Image (cartoon, rainbow, N blue to C red):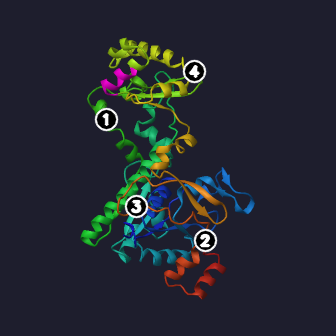
Amino acid sequence: MPPPLDGIRVLDLSRLLPGPYCAMLLADYGADVVKVEDVGAGDLVRLMPPFVGEGTDARSALFLAVNRGKRSLAVDLKDGRGKEVFRRLAARADVVLEGFRPGVMERLGLGYEGLRAANPRLVYCALTGYGRDGPWRDRAGHDLNYLAQAGVLAITGEAGRPPVPPGVQVADLTGGLLAFAGILLALVARGRTGEGQLVDVSMLDGALSLLSIHAGAALAGEPPRRGRFPLSGGRPFYAVYETADGKHLALGAVEPKFYEAFCRTIGRDDLTGAQLAEGDEADRARAEIAAIVRGRTLAEWSARFEGVEACVTPVLEVEDALDTEQAIARGLRRALPHPALGLIPQVGPPVKLSATPAELGKPPPDLGEHTDAVLREAGYDDGAVFELRASGVIR
């Protein structure tokens, strides 16, 4: 069977992480994604270290990680001829994805209403920090700002210490996932009505939506506090403990049977009653468990908990997490052939479809690598392509 998004053409104007991550997922499931970049440096992630390869073959590892399966078109959208190139492509496209602040595409003369007039079936996804309306719509921001404004940052970290930035760009990637979902929803709706629509995704909205249980507690009059919420370090049964060799053990024994199995395995059945302890009692139980866990190495604890259902796991480094038997079995540790770099590592697609599985597709493109091919598909002949290149409108 063909992939689920076979025949869907996406014009992706987004940069950095949220939009490119969304577009990569669309490509994994069969969409023809054309990455529309400027004729200068292109997506700025191309310039960010670390780099793979040497000299002219060097490529940003960060760019390689989120841009597989795409083609690159380099065009100057500030030039009238470049705008016309984009309009012609959008008239035949299924999806436009952009991550500019509200109003930028309209000032370029490439906003949703104009593109929709020429292509009523177009699904237009705007992925922004704060959304297309509201008093904050024009603010600049990045992942940390959205998490701060959403209340996520305030509850991240240890009690009595400052908030800690998460190790993963939570708001950015949530925004990318919601844009992916929003585009798919709009395509399903188009299949029924024949009409496209505007998909408005805000990374602040996405971060706020993650606060479901925390918001429930807050609205019930018990707002969560950093390091005190049951699932963020406030209870001994759900915490991270240091081992004798400076590594860490994660305990997520939410159900009583798991916590009882944990206490039994560490030789402290008397601590089972402290699972739901609060305040000073919880602190004392956590301190006792911490002292016990510090008495053995991570390897020793892993061996002791082998086969014990207590929701105890080692805290793995990224490179180790990708090398586990489970990650390999699930197809999350992958490699993709690159013409200049050989095999490049990739994290595989997360959604498993039994009949139409995802494919990694083409390697991440060089800047403007597919410009000529994309323009010819849009009806430009060799002379027109040559003229656009000679005048600097395309690269």
Residue 260 part of the magenta segment: yes
Label 3 Cα neighbours within 10 Å, binned few <14 / some 14-19 / many ≥20: some
Residue 255 part of the magenta segment: yes
Closer to the chain start, of discs 4 and 3, is 4
| Relative to 10, 246 lies left or right | right
Task: Please provide the residue range marked out in magenta.
Answer: 254-262
Return the residue at label 3.
357
- Distance from Cα at disc 4 to Cα at disc 3: 43 Å
Badge 4 vs badge 3, beta-carbon distance below 8 Å: no
Q: Compared to 106, does 255 lie above or below?
A: above
Which quadrant holds the N terminus? bottom left
Secondary structure type for disc 3: loop
Badge 4 vs badge 2, beta-carbon distance below 8 Å: no
Return the residue at label 1.
213
Please provide percent x and percent y for residue 358.
43, 61
- Distance from Cα at disc 3 to Cα at disc 1: 33 Å
Marking on residue 369: 2
Closer to the chain start, of discs 3 and 1, is 1
Please provide percent x and percent y for residue 138.
46, 52
